[in-house]
Amino acid sequence: MKLLTFLLSLLSLTALAQADFEKNLQKRLILAEDGSTIEIEAGRFQLTKTLSLEGKKNIILRGKGIDKTILSFKSQTQGAEGLRVSNCENIVIEDMTTEDSKGDLIKTMNVKGITFRRLKAAWTGGPKSTNGSYALYPVLCENVLIDSCIAIGASDAGIYVGQSKHIIVRNSEAYENVAGIEIENSLYADVYNNKAIGNTGGILVFDLPDLVQKKGGHVRVHHNLVKENNLKNFAPKGNIVGNVPKGTGMMVLAASNVEFFENQIINNATIGVAVISYYMTENAIKDKDYDPYPTAVSIHHNTFERKPRRVPMDSRFGKMYRFVLRFGRHVPAVVYDGILNPAKVGPDRKYPLDYSICVRDNVNQSTANLDAEHNFKGLKQGKDLFDCDLEHVKSTKF
């Protein structure tokens, strides 16, 4: 009985200490003066509410390291995000782990100058549709740096940058997410030296309708390892990323001025790189300002490897590959849906060079033009269907 009483007392004291930690940390975030550094000690801390930082400048929020300072939101009862930063300038978040929030783990919104550095953001119970959408989630931000971070288990994208400008994502890793890394409706991005392994889709560059920032582009994706992204899609029903077939290495959807080069694209079961228009989603377009066509996409000097096998059947793409396109066990490394913007084609019914899809100088290169616009009747396969050379996308600096 004495032992039981001691243990109950110990648990009660621990709970009080955790509550004090949470209350104190939120208080420090509220009272922080511009230019402050907020240090968080090592340890595992259970939090029940969203932490928020609002309207501050030049703040550093620093732990003692990945898996040394752990903020767990597993018992969260209030708010959706783990940490939310909004309407700020020059914020650095570094050296800590965040886990198991109900919604997004770290969301930053309307922040000019945001750095995520040496962070791990993960759902620890494995891939589930009930996991939050995004692990690291800057949206409507400028000058975004995501460096040496790890994202695991997001039911949308592990590392997601949306409707932002001037972006660098580097030296980071994404595992067991629906999308490993996604750049959406964003301008001027460099994505390099990352690993996207074991997700449903490795690296996605999307432009979607009905968003504030209409058109993304000028995105460079290079020197990444994109390997074995063959995880079953576990996105909640109705989510656009739920259309991404498992086995997708990289995908461009409706974005323009995108360059993929020097990537290792290894054993993704369905697609090495896909370039598709929004029409392939079969969703209605109500946004009059939306451009659903990808243009000016360059894919060069990448290495493709894929073991001969039939594509997985549990997606619309997989069924189309097998029963309509009949690719068999040797599917093309690069596929383009071939749906053209009629306003941009020339008299020969082709794009002029500035809008073209160009594929050349890749190891194990094979390509297909699906001619989806004409119900695949003009399907073409070959090594050099898109042999052209675009002007390089400029690197991002800020």
Image: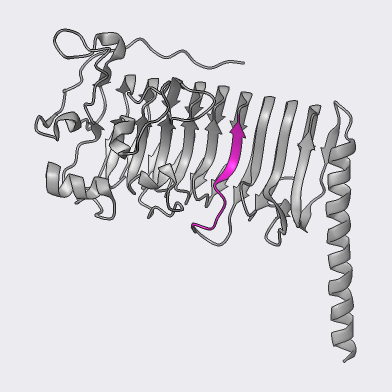
Residue 247 falls left or right of residue 3 = left
- Quadrant in the picture for the C terminus: top right
x, y percentage for residue 107? 65, 39
Q: In the figure, 141 relative to 172: above or below?
A: above
For image coordinates 36% across by 44% down, the residue present is 244
Q: Which residue extends farthest left?
A: 377
Left or right of 290 in this view: 386: left
Report the residue at 19% width, 45% height from top.
320
Magenta residue span: 129-139
Residue 281 lies, in percent from the top left, at 32, 39
Say whether residue 173 is magenta. Answer: no
Q: Position of residue 259 (x, y in %)?
A: 38, 21
| Residue that appears at 19% across and 41% down | 331
Left or right relative to 285: residue 128: right
Say which of 25 and 193 sits in front: 25
Tell me: residue 5, above or below residue 219.
Answer: below
Residue 372 visible in the snapshot: yes
Q: Residue furthest bottom?
A: 1
